[in-house]
Image (cartoon, grey):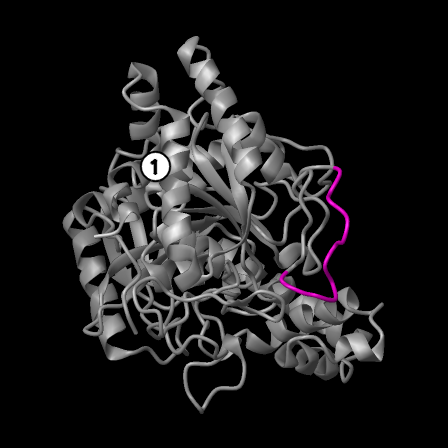
Amino acid sequence: MTDANATAGIAYLSVAELTARYRNKSLSPREVLAAVLERIDAFNGAVNAFRFVDRVGAMAAAETSEARWMKGEPLGALDGVPASVKDILLVKGWSTTYGSSVLAETAPSREDAPAVARLREAGAVLLGMTNTPEIGWKGVTDSTAHGITRNPWNLGRTPGGSSGGAAAACALGMGALHIGTDGGGSIRIPSAFTGLFGIKASFGRVPAYPASAFGTLAHIGPITRSVADAAQMLNALSRPDARDWYALPYDGRDYTEGLQDGIKGLKIAYSPTLGYAKVDAEIAALVRKAIEALAAQGAEVEEVDPGFDCPREIFHKLWFPPAAFRCRHLTDAQRRQLDPGLQEIIDQSQAWDLTDFMQATQDRAALGTHMRKFHETYDLLITPTLPVPAFKAGDEVADATQTRWTDWAAFTYPFNLTQQPAASIPCGFASDGLPAGLQIVGRMHDEATMLRAARAYEAVHPLAMPTEPLGG
């Protein structure tokens, strides 16, 4: 057993457990940080979750937090809780590389992104930046600048992406709270592949600045080991920031309230395929078993597809051109240094004109309207998060029949188009020992019901974590 495994009991504590022990002085933020850093030292080399760790800054933050707790004056529920930031967001004093050598910021940022600022204001201990593919463009995590991130459940497999570094860190106890971004599934995909809870709230719920290259498809949200931790994190992240003119009005909601209220009487639509996806048989069986567990708790479950065609082409026409725009200033020599897949989608976007873009925008609006009407009948829509188990690390696709990550992420990106809240919660393991995910989609602006359903499932099927990376 490694020394880091000996610290797992500390590193895997929930937010509530940490704050209770800080309050009774049986544990300190410095001791927790030391345990987390031990695990980073022991396991980051295997999974490549962090591309940068700020040990000096983290220790200073932990010491300051400890002083507040000793005086009985914590800033709140997240004070002294270790957290990471995806290498897409700005952190004051850190340089953001966006997973790229040619798009990296060379100077340290002068300001925090809103989500980072909210965690810092809440007293969270910022550990460092987690790995992502260039500009977070795909559903796996391999960076031309920082290498391949691997799945803690099987080092030969991908953790998914583009928030794969955050997920790998979270699963291995390298921090309790992890900021991810999700433009087509980038929080939910790695959460499903690594057995975590991840949520993208309604668009605008978590303020963003600077605006994502992917515009109104892009969300920011928590990746955690429990629903309650994500709810606490969302309490902080959803606080207002004037820099985001898309942001929803701040409603002051406490997302931990009502988590234990159960799901009796909720009307749930269960769609095994969304009407078009091909799903691995083991994953389909695990998701159906999870649906039965929800029905046993009193939910009214109806198997029904929401009734829209696969929106892959709509998504591509709204995803590929922004990637090209983000890279528009690069020289030909710099372009050749980009991820080959990113170069391909940039080239493909050149075939589309303004008419294509506007038609995709109108088609997206029709899909959003369709789902608003669908949720007049149903409180929630539940699907598999992904139709496949985690595949080989370093690959973009699950098999030779596919060309892009959107071929296998058929359940996630539709709900970036509609901007609804959506979450992934683990629902068991396939025969190869890899986790499967259950996607819970809520009506627009109703994160609370979605979180309540996730907690109801978690209460009878608690999340499991690996204590160390497993071989592959």
Main SS, magenta region, reads loop
Of 383 and 466, the residue lying toward us: 466
Which residue occupies 30% across, 50% down?
A: 267
Badge 1 density bin: few <14, some 14–19, many ≥20, Cα 10 Å: many
Residue name at image x 55 percent, y 76 percent? 312
User: In the picture provided, is 159 more to the left or to the right than 454?
Assistant: right
Which residue does the numbered mark 1 point to in the structure image? 228
Instruction: Give left or right: position of 339 versus 21.
Output: right
In the rendered picture of this protein, how many numbered marks are placed on residues? 1
For the residue pair 24 and 216, the one nearer the viewer reads as: 24
Mark 1 lies on a secondary structure that is: helix
| Above or below, 163 relative to 253 | below
Part of the protein shown in magenta = 99-110
- Whether the magenta-drawn stretch holds residue 106 is answered as yes
User: Label 1 is placed on what type of residue?
Assistant: Ala
Q: Is residue 263 visible?
A: no
Measured along the vertical axis of the image, is residue 11 above or below residue 348?
A: above
